[in-house]
Image (cartoon, rainbow, N blue to C red):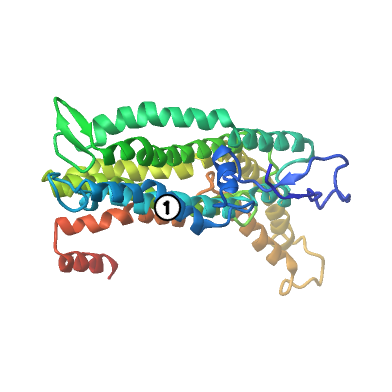
Amino acid sequence: METELFSRPAPASSGVSSVAGAPSQMDFSLVLGGPLYQLMRRTHVANDTFGLLRNRLVAIVAIAWVPLLVLSLLEGQALGGPAAVPFLKDAEAQVRFLVALPLLVVAELVVHQRMRLVVRQFLDRQLIPEAALPRFDAAIASAFRLRNSLVAELILVAMVYVFGVMGVWRYYIALSGTATWYAAPADDRMALSTTGLWYAFVSLPLFQFLLIRWYFRILIWTRFLWQVSRIELSLIPTHPDRLGGLGFLSNIAYAFTPLALAHGALVTGPIANRIFYLGASLADFKGEVAFIVLFVMALVFGPFLVFVSPLASAKRTGLREYGTLAERYVREFDRKWLRGGAPPGEPLVGSGDIQSLADLGNSFEVVKTMRVAPMTRDAVLRLFAATVAPIVPLFLTMMSLEHLVRKLLGLVF
């Protein structure tokens, strides 16, 4: 297992250095594992820390896009020819392999860097009780087993070829009834060209595999968080992050920005083709755009919802306990300062009682405003913007650039 090991920090209140015989804590990564990762290491397009990003980008474009360009040039389908949609004018293909595919690769490095210390955060913040450490370690080990599974990746490959290529793409995505650089209509079916064979059985499956591999990783991430949420976490209702100490999870959402961009680009390509070659309008695809936005939001923020129940429980407990404490304090404050209970000669001005009352009020307000889901408005808006950003240029098919700029300026100012 290609992971860095370091000893688990002991809880500050325990007074001991560590638990004897406790398992080592490991960097948590959804990326550093699996047969494809091992293949990338052996071919020197990745290392133990998942560096060499440029090598991976060059390799992936060289496999998925360059052969299509060369074959389409040889067949006279790159810029013209009999095809109604030449290769270099196919917006879907260019966006898929030169924008979305590299973004899927970039997302791996970004998510790895932002997520690798998530396990340490659970322990550094003492959210995992000492008695629950074995369950926590078991959740980590289980996630790593799934991440490294050869069987899982073989199943993903089978799904790509059986459902992705032969099913969804051929019948629902490909431009049927129109001669393209990859196929020509023939007897109610598509007759693939030589370029089309590489596209259908190498380039497209590679893209689809990397995409659904991301979905599998997010499934692993969701399962891990769900297992952690079943532990009786030591949440602090008065924590200033207003998430009981789980605020670090909401920051991880920013790491998925490249993945959101990739999904926005993925839907942009097919829409652009249908606008340019089939006479459609961008307004015809409001449903598709709304769906991809909601899908990305569910993909990124859905896993965090497993903490709704423990956070809601911690908030209820905090309101009850701090409400009781506040009740006792304000009664004593009232008795002392308003009912003549203060010792003779004790000055009101400069008394720490008033500051303590204010501090208690602030603590109760923190508990009262505690959120029950580790997500922020800023993260939601950023991911929304990232998802729709690739679609924005298509507005030029509905209005001039000058009109679009005026509209955008009007929204800002």
Q: Is residue 187 above or below residue 390?
A: above
Q: Is residue 85 left or right of residue 66?
A: left
In the image, what residue occupies the spot 68% across and 40% down?
233
Q: Is residue 60 left or right of residue 229?
A: left
Residue 242 position, x and y percent, is 58, 52
Instruction: Quickly name the residue at label 1.
Output: 103
Q: List x then y, in percent, for residue 397.
A: 15, 56
In the foreground, 146 or 177: 177
For image coordinates 67% across by 47% down, the residue present is 119
Q: Is residue 21 visible?
A: yes
> Is any part of residue 257 visible from this angle?
no
The structure residue drawn at horizontal position 39% and vertical position 37%, both measured from the top left corner, is: 205
Q: Could you tell me which secondary element the residue under label 1 belongs to?
A: helix
From this view, report whether residue 279 is shown above or below residue 345: above
Query: Mark 1 is on which residue type?
Result: Leu
Observer-nearest residue: 352 or 400?
400
Image location (x, y in percent) of residue 106: 47, 54
